[in-house]
Structures are given as C-alpha cells and as structure tokens.
Image (spheres, rainbow, N blue to C red):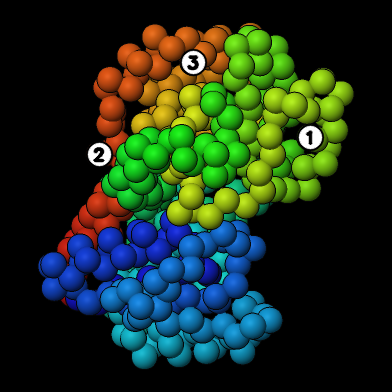
C-alpha cells in the first residue's frame, strides 16, 4: 500500500501532521510520499526554518514548482500528472477538492481506476454567502472523491449535503502538535519573568491571534475590551497578526483612548507562539465566521482558556462551553458575559484544574489514524 499526499505548500501545521502521518503509516508498513506544489506561500510566512530538509520525513518531500512558476498552467498540471503516475499510489490524499492539484489527482484516479482519492477540508455551511449554482457544481466535483477527512461535525454535515456518504467521512483534520505546545508552555511558565522582559509582555494580558481582515472582527475584540473592566484591573490586550486593517484598528484604539493598553504584534514565529499564549490570561477569537480556528487549538494546548464565537468551527467541539472556555453568540451582551467570566480568576483556576480537557481527542494521531483507516479500507478493494 502506498499513500501519496498532495498539498499546495507546507507550513508548520502541515509539516507536523505530515511527520506524524509518516511515522504512523510506516509502523503498519505503508509507504508514504508527499508532493508539494511550491515552497512559496503567503499563508505560511512565519514557518519555522529549523530542520527543514533534514527531518527524516521532510527529506522525502518533493517540491514541484519553481520560483514564480504558475501552478495552474497546463504545463505544470501535466508535470504533476506524470509525477503522480511515477509514484503509482494506491491512495491519494489531497488538501481540498477544488484546487488545481486536487483536480489533477482526481483525473488520475478516474483514468487509472485502481487508486482511490480522499480530500481534507474544513468548510461548513456558514462560511460566508452560499450561492445555489456554485454549490451545485461543488457537489458534482466533491462526490467524485472516495471520501473526505473533515474538521468537525458541522463540516461533516456540509459535505454530506454535497453528496458524500457519511460512512466515507472521517472527522479530525484541523489538529496541532499538542505535546509540542504543552511542553513549550511549561518552559515558558518556568521562565515567565525572563520572557516578559525579553518580549516586552505586560504582567496581565488578553491575547487575540488573528489576521487583521474584516471577517475576523478584531474591532469587536477591541470594543469588548473597552467595555470590560479589564483595563481598570491592569489587564492589557495583545493583538497578534497582520493584515489590511492594521492601521484602521490602531486608529480605532486611538479614538477609544486605548493606545497605552492595546499592543499590536505582527508575525510571531510558531516556535515563540507558546510563550505568548501560555502567559496570557485567555485568548479571544470573535470572527464572523472561521472554518475552524487553529489558534484555539494552540491556546488550549498551552493550558490557556479561550472565548470564541459559535461561528468558529471549533466551537462546541474542541471548545467546550464552561469547561475550557466559553462560546458566545456574538452579541455584545453575550461577549461581555464571556469576558467577565474569564476575568474572574476563580473561573480560570477551575478550568485549568481540568487540563488537558478534551485535547487527546484533537491531536495529530487522530488525523494520521483517519488516513490509515482509509488506506486499510481501500486496500480490501484491490
């Protein structure tokens, strides 16, 4: 059995999953290869550079695209098809179902008949406006695949709607390396005083990790902070992220008189993220919609409670209301209730006493086992 993984680019999230997958599949004698379309990606500018190419699995990843090469060109697609043909996979696993490289993998599966193909996705119904015509064509494409690995229950329901049988869907895609974040957080807390000075972190702060774009509603976070008693209690707000709205958000803070208590940090390397997360009181994510919200995984892995809207995919699955944080309906009054509850130290102590919460259900191994289950199931068809 040979599994071939197709991805557009690789960031820290994907590399952790791929390494874990390689380890898990190899224990069952499954050959595992990765084709990466490009080394370049605007989505993973902060990828850690250490160890790239020297890891026993990363050294086996093949990068196809050259610098500046158009990955949607016919020439590139033909080259990708030939590379897949050379690998002769029994199972193809691809990120997404409508990316150009996913479709090339699907064409290979339809022409060769023998191999199977599954995709990984975290889309759900409430990810922005859904247009019937577009959903119809998505359904035609998605149901050509043999299965899907999706982020959670809401994503499973969406892809069932598109026509994929529930028995061909596995839940557990958006996962992070919980143990890495947990261990790094332990070190950060042991060296707390040193890191606060080194990184200029206030004694008490709330953290928001987000791209600074409209749907992420960082303005809501700032407004909620302004309405709360946090500032009067000496608690600052730290916003980590960059985007087109950064200057508008800074100006918004100025108008509210919060310039001295709201801090902005742009790109933070993933290796440093556990420090920022573990030393925070709690994390806030108030997106209008988020397919999942991996910063929630990271914060919880660090032992830091969270507040998120119910439009985040992780809400009510990874994030358990009242257990490891709070889920809000997004209204001002409900957000304020959540902020007030998390500013109460007794609630924080109670939540942290139950750590690691449900994190074992959302670890790298869950994703790897999903791939292995598909591989084992499809091997019976040979």
Residue plotted at (48% across, 68% down): 49
Position of 85 relative to 3 (above/below): below
Q: Residues within 10 Å of mark 3 (few under 14, many from 20)?
A: many
- Which quarter of the figure is the C terminus placed in? bottom left
> Real-space Cα distance between discs 2 and 3?
24 Å
- Left or right side of 294 for 365: left
- Left or right side of 105 for 39: right
Q: Residues within 10 Å of mark 2 (few under 14, many from 20)?
A: few
- Secondary element at tag 2: helix
- Residue identified by numbered label 1: 249
Disc number for residue 360: 2
Position of 112 relative to 324 (above/below): below
On the image, the x and y values in percent for residue 94 come to 43, 66
Are the two marked residues, 2 and 1, in contact with CB atoms closer than 8 angstroms?
A: no
Q: Nearer the viewer, mark 2 or mark 1?
A: 1
Residue plotted at (35% across, 16% down): 349
Who is closer to the viewer here, 129 or 9? 9
- Residue identified by numbered label 3: 342
- Left or right side of 24 for 10: right
Residue plotted at (43% across, 35% down): 192
Q: Is residue 378 visible?
A: no
- Secondary element at tag 3: helix
| Between discs 2 and 3, the one toward the N terminus | 3
- Left or right side of 306 for 34: left
> Real-space Cα distance between discs 1 and 3?
24 Å
On the image, the x and y values in percent for residue 353 come to 28, 20
């Amino acid at each position: 059995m040979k599994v071939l993984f197709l991805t557009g680019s690789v960031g820290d999230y994907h590399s952790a999953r791929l390494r874990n997958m390689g380890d898990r599949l190899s224990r069952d004698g499954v050959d595992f290869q990765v084709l990466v379309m490009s080394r370049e990606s605007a989505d993973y500018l902060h990828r850690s550079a250490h160890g790239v190419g020297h890891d026993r699995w990363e050294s086996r990843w093949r990068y196809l695209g050259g610098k500046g090469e158009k990955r949607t060109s016919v020439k590139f697609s033909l080259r990708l098809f030939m590379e897949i043909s050379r690998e002769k996979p029994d199972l193809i696993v691809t990120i997404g179902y409508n990316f150009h490289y996913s479709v090339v993998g699907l064409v290979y599966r339809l022409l060769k008949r023998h191999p199977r193909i599954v995709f990984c996705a975290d889309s759900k119904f409430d990810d922005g406006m859904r247009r019937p015509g577009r959903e119809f064509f998505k359904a035609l494409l998605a149901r050509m695949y043999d299965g899907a690995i999706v982020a959670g229950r809401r994503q499973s329901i969406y892809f069932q709607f598109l026509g994929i049988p529930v028995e061909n869907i596995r839940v557990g895609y958006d996962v992070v390396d919980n143990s890495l974040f947990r261990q790094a957080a332990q070190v950060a807390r042991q060296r707390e005083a040193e890191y606060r000075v080194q990184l200029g972190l206030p004694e008490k702060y709330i953290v928001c990790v987000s791209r600074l774009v409209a749907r992420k509603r960082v303005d809501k976070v700032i407004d909620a902070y302004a309405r709360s008693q946090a500032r009067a209690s000496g608690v600052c707000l730290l916003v980590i992220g960059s985007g087109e709205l950064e200057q508008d958000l800074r100006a918004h803070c100025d108008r509210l008189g919060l310039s001295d208590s709201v801090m902005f940090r742009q790109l933070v390397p993933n290796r440093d993220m556990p420090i920022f997360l573990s030393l925070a009181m709690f994390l806030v994510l108030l997106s209008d919609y988020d397919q999942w919200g991996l910063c929630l995984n990271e914060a919880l892995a660090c032992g830091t409670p969270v507040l998120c809207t119910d439009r985040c995919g992780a809400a009510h699955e990874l994030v358990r209301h009242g257990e490891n944080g709070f889920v809000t309906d997004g209204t001002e009054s409900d957000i304020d209730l959540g902020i007030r509850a998390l500013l109460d130290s007794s609630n924080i102590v109670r939540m942290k006493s139950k750590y690691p919460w449900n994190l074992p259900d959302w670890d790298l191994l869950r994703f790897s086992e999903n791939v292995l289950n598909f591989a084992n199931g499809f091997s019976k068809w040979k």
